Image: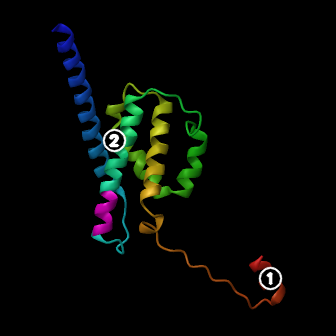
Amino acid sequence: TEEEFELDGAFGLAEAHFHDIHMISQKMSVELIDRLPFSTEVSEEERLHIRKELRMGMMHVNRKNWIFDFEMTSFTSKKQLQFFFETYPIFSTAIQNVIQDNKRYFLEKDERFMIRLFYDYLFLLVGICPVSYFEAPIHVCIDFSQGSAYTDYIIS
C-alpha cells in the first residue's frame, strides 16, 4: 500500500542518516586519535582500546546531538572553555581542531550546539584516556631543610 511505501521510505531515510552519523563519527575519531601525542609507554593494545572506545563514544555523542533536539543549560557557554583549555590543553586543542576541520557537517547547527559538542567530546576523551598517557609526570621536590615550622607548614 501507499502507507507502507511511505513508511519504508522513512525508515530508509533514518537508516541513511544513522549511516552518515556512523561514518562521520568514525572519521572524526580517527582524526582525533591521530592528533593526540601518546606517550611511548602506552602499549599498542591500550591504543587500540582507546580507538575503539572513542569511536563508539563519538558515535553515541553524535547520534544524541544530531538526532534529538534538546536544550542544555550547562556547558553551553564559551566562558568555561578557557578553564578546560588550561586544564586539558592537549585534549582541548585536538578536539577544537577536529571540530573545525569537520565544520561542513555542522553547517545548520548553531554555536551552542558546537560548544556542547566540544564539551561532550572532551568529557568522553577524559573518561577514556588518562592524561598520563600524553603528558610527562611532574616531579615535585620540597626542601625540608628550613626547619620543623616550615615542614609543618608544607604538610598542612
Residue at x-position 46% and y-position 49% = 122
For residue 10, which quarter of the picture?
top left
Can you say whether 100 is above or below 104 in the image?
Answer: below
x and y, in percent, of residue 124 in the image = 44, 51
In this figure, which residue is indicated by the disc labeled 1?
152
Considering the image in quadrants, where does the C terminus appear? bottom right
Give the quarter of the image for residue 68: top left
User: Which residue is denoted by mark 2 in the rendering?
Assistant: 101
- Specify whether 77 is left or right of 36: right
Q: Position of residue 25 (x, y in %)?
A: 30, 42
Q: CA distance from mark 1 to mark 2?
A: 52 Å
Task: Describe residue 52's horizontal placement relative to residue 85 as left or right.
Answer: left
Is disc 2 placed on a helix, strand or loop?
helix
The amino acid pointed to by label 2 is Asp
Residue interval drawn in magenta? 45-51
User: What is the residue that sits farthest to the right in this orientation?
Assistant: 149
